[in-house]
Structures are given as structure tokens and as C-alpha cells.
């Protein structure tokens, strides 16, 4: 019996999802990975926090960090015309296209390599046509329902950010956690030593109100 697929939760609004995607693509060559597009904003609402781009003093740092990481990894990155933006059209386009690696490639390339707008069906219509989809795909109720279901399942799994690679119940958040995720995938015992187990039940000594 084959192992269940890993799940990679992502939203096109995240430059760090764009940066991790090539690593996930490479992982797909040896392991079954299911890409799961989700609404990052709904995840943030569920856990009661703001995104990094919604915190003024964190916003520019986050953008610079993403650009620096892209340059370190020799990945072309050009921010879209405005950020944050509404990613619903891009997410729906992905689902309408079957959430295939080629479709994900194309959407990430449009928004993050070319720096094109991805915030509406009108902005993404040329890309939809290239993917063989009509403009009506953005308003398809089945597509909308699938995106809601993806997001609800992610929240139920404990997701707190994107991108996140899920290995069973273990969640590895962020492009910079990819190496840890792969290490655990290859050796699950890494999370089972005494200190790792202790961290899972470490008590809180204080909590902000």
C-alpha cells in the first residue's frame, strides 16, 4: 500500500510560497505531494492574527527578505503592482485548472516572476486563456466550493500560515522550514527524541491578555 500524499498548503499571495514551490516540485519526483490552494486570509482570521504585510513596520522587511532569499536562491522575483492583493481569482483559476503543477507554475510565474496583477478575473483572463479556460471559470460555483473546502480542511488540520508542508499531522511552515520537513520525512524519529517530545508539552509561564 502506498504512503498517503504529503500536503502542501499555499496561497498565491505569498512570495514565500513562490520561493518554496520549486523545492516542492523537486520533492514530487520522489514523494507524492498534493498541492492544496487555500485562502490565507481565512486562515489568519481563524487563528486571530494579521499577515506580515498587514503590519506596517513588518511589511517592507518582509518584502526585502523575500527578495533577498530569491536572489540567494537564484530565483527571479518581481513583486506584482500592489501587495497585499485579493488572491481569490488566482486561487480559483488554479482549482479550475485542476491544481496541476503546470497550472501552479504558470500562475506563480505570472504574479511573481513577471510581476503581473493577479487580483481579478480580468487581470488573469489572458493566463486563463493560455490554460484553456474560459473567463466563466472564476465564477464557477463548484470551483468556489472546492476552495472553501480546501481552506476549511486546512484550518481543521491546524494550519496557521502559508506555505505549509504537512507530513501526517506535523506542519512545517515556511520556505525556510523546507529542509527540516524533508529531514523529518526521511527520518521521522527526528521528532521523537526526548527533547523534541518535551517541546510538545512545554508549559506556558505567562500569557498576554
Image (cartoon, helix red, strand yellow):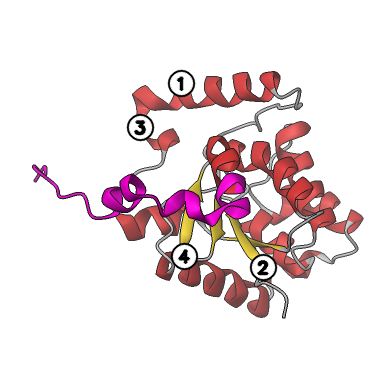
Residue 5: numbered disc: 2
Residue contact at pointers 4 and 3, CB within 8 angstroms = no
Q: Distance between the residues labelled 2 and 1?
A: 34 Å
Q: Nearer the viewer, residue 116 or 36?
A: 36
Looking at the picture, tell me which residue is in the foreground, 157 or 3. Answer: 3
Q: In this view, does 198 lie above or below 76?
A: below
Q: Name the residue under label 1.
A: 61
Q: Which of 80 and 189 is in front in this view?
A: 189
Mark 4 and mark 3: Cα distance apart in space: 29 Å
Q: What stretch is highlighted in magenta?
A: 182-209
180 sits left or right of 96 in the view: left
Q: Nearer the viewer, mark 4 or mark 1?
A: 4
Residue lying at 79% horizontally and 65% vertically, measured from the top left: 97
| Label 2 Cα neighbours within 10 Å, binned few <14 / some 14-19 / many ≥20 | some
Q: Does the magenta stretch include residue 206?
A: yes
**Does dot 3 land on a helix, a strand or a loop?**
loop
Give x and y (percent) for residue 208: 11, 42
Q: Is residue 38 visible?
A: yes
Q: Who comes first in sequence, dot 3 or dot 2?
A: 2
Residue at 75% in and 27% down: 75
Looking at the image, can residue 10 be seen?
no
Cα separation, mark 4 vs mark 1, equals 31 Å
The span from disc 1 to disc 3 (Cα, nearest Å) is: 10 Å
Residue indicated by mark 4: 169
Residue 128, position as x, y percentages in the image: 82, 57
Q: Residues within 10 Å of mark 4 (few under 14, many from 20)?
A: few
Q: Mark 3 points at which residue?
A: 55
Front position among marks 4 and 3: 4
- Mark 2 or mark 4: which comes first in sequence? 2
Give the Cα distance between marks 3 and 2.
35 Å
Amino acid at each position: 500500500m502506498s504512503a498517503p500524499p504529503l500536503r502542501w498548503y499555499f496561497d498565491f499571495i505569498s512570495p514565500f510560497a513562490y520561493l518554496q514551490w520549486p523545492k516542492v516540485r523537486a520533492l514530487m519526483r520522489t514523494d507524492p505531494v498534493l498541492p492544496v490552494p487555500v485562502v490565507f486570509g481565512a486562515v489568519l482570521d481563524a487563528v486571530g492574527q494579521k499577515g506580515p504585510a498587514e503590519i506596517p513596520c513588518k511589511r517592507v522587511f518582509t518584502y526585502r527578505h523575500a527578495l533577498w532569499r530569491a536572489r540567494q536562491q537564484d530565483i527571479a522575483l518581481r513583486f506584482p503592482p500592489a501587495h497585499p492583493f485579493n488572491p481569490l481569482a488566482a486561487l480559483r483559476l488554479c482549482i479550475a485548472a485542476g491544481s496541476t503543477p503546470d497550472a501552479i507554475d504558470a500562475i506563480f510565474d505570472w504574479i511573481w516572476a513577471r510581476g503581473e496583477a493577479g487580483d481579478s478575473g480580468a487581470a488573469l483572463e489572458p493566463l486563463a486563456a493560455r490554460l484553456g479556460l474560459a473567463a466563466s471559470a472564476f465564477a464557477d460555483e463548484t470551483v468556489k466550493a472546492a476552495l472553501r473546502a480546501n481552506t476549511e480542511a486546512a484550518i481543521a488540520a491546524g494550519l496557521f500560515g502559508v506555505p505549509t508542508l504537512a507530513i501526517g499531522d506535523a506542519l512545517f511552515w515556511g520556505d525556510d522550514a523546507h529542509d527540516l520537513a524533508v529531514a523529518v520525512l526521511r527520518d521521522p524519529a527526528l521528532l521523537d527524541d526526548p527533547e523534541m517530545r518535551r517541546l510538545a508539552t512545554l508549559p506556558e509561564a505567562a500569557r498576554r491578555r
